[in-house]
Amino acid sequence: MTTTISETQRRFTYYRWLIFSILALGYVLVYFHRLSPGVMALDLMESFGVGATVVGILGSAYFYPYAIMQLPAGLLSDSLGPRKSVTIFLIIAAAGATLFALSPNIQTAIAARVLVGLGVCMVFVPALKILSQWFTRGEFSMMTAILNAMGGVGVLIAAAPLAFLTERIGWRNSFFAIGAATLVLALVVWKWVRNRPDEVGLPPIIVGDETSRDAVKAIPLVSGMLLVLQNGRFWAIAIWFFFNCGVFFGLGGLWGGPYLMQVYGLSKTQAGGILNMLAVGLIIGSPVLSTLSDRVFRSRKKVMLLSALALCLTLLLPVISTDRLPFPLLYVLFYSIGMFSAAIVVIAFTATKELFPLEIAGTSVGTVNLFPFAGGAAFQPLLGYILARFTGESNAAGYRAVFIACFISAVIALISISLMKETLVSKPETK
């Protein structure tokens, strides 16, 4: 009997960590595809014979389907099943990456980026559904945090490693390889990932408070959305998300690489090395900011305010500098953007969930998640347009204008979050 239980436990442990590892690789690809144009922007401008504004539109094409799909993602995952959803949509992403590599013109490339954004939008939500069946509630929060941290690995790969690869084999061949890797991962998901333990003959996990969770009355999606959007306190966080993440996706996702190459004369690989600091800031910042919020300040608002202020001060550096920044400060600049513009969103999502009753907590997070990607969709072409206005002038002047726009956006985010309601309410001590 003991041997049977032990063998079952070993199989259960093996399967759930195998499934988590595969899904984590999928989330690495999500962030990789999101930020991959950053080290290739100049190559794309040359290949398609277009300017900064059009490349900004190309970069932003990823964000439109991703943003639109945030709300129906859960419903679609329920109807298709999470395993099937991840498989089908990763195949779509693979097709998009391959089409991108083959693109004969900018119009096809933009359509390909739309396909990629549509494909990877159905990874995170279905992955959470699967993990909720393989890990207990106490384990689930930690696994979600680790899954989020894997996004930082995607940022890392989209910087120096991708820069190195494109320098060796070109951006088209690189995306052929990326498309193939995405397709292979889709097949791996279909073969080895399972929605629930009982699909491989294992008992379900036992969650002590399952009854209380099921007792929560569900509210229809549209009704929940209206309740969220009618709450004035929601908009302070939503506006912060738009401008804060617009800065991250605008600089980190597209124009940071060209800035380093055109203003500082760095090679693609050297620029990628500095862009790696975005990933370092994201990976380190997530647990640090969470600890500050949960244990040190016992506040969501204070940590978000400090982070917003730090981002403003960081972006002020290239604005007030009369010359190029010292080389070491470039590492500080991009590390800070990764930490104070990307890692901080973990706290913002938690605050959004805490702002509303449990019945619409999921809807509130899904609704607010529209805004960071709307920010990315707006900022990449906006910053490209600003750069295009400086054609014929020095590169430094154009990018200084870009950083002025980002600084103004960070100030708006700071003002918005100062109007936010504190959501972490301390429980009274029991006497």
Image (cartoon, helix red, strand yellow):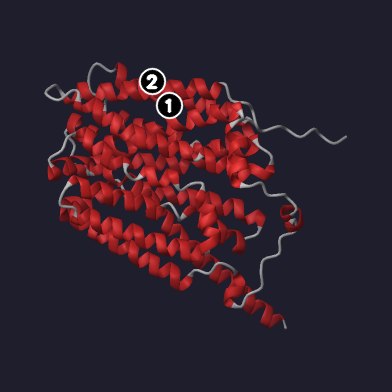
Q: Report the amino acid beneath label 1.
A: Leu
Residue beneath disc 1: 311
Residue 27 vertical position relative to residue 68 in the rendered view, above or below: below
Residue 372, image x, y percentages: 44, 37
180 sits to left or right of 424: left
Residue beneath disc 2: 408
268 sits to left or right of 73: left
Q: Which residue shows up at 21% across the image and 33% down it?
A: 52
Question: Residue 23 has which mark?
Answer: none
User: Which one is earlier in the sequence, the residue at label 2 or at label 1?
Assistant: 1
Residue 258, image x, y percentages: 22, 35
Question: What is the quadrant of the C terminus in the image?
Answer: top right
124 sits to left or right of 378: right
In which image quadrant can residue 11 be found? bottom right
What's the CA distance linking mark 2 and mark 1?
11 Å
28 sits to left or right of 238: left
Residue 242, image x, y percentages: 44, 32
Q: Are marks 2 and 1 in contact (CB under 8 Å)?
A: no
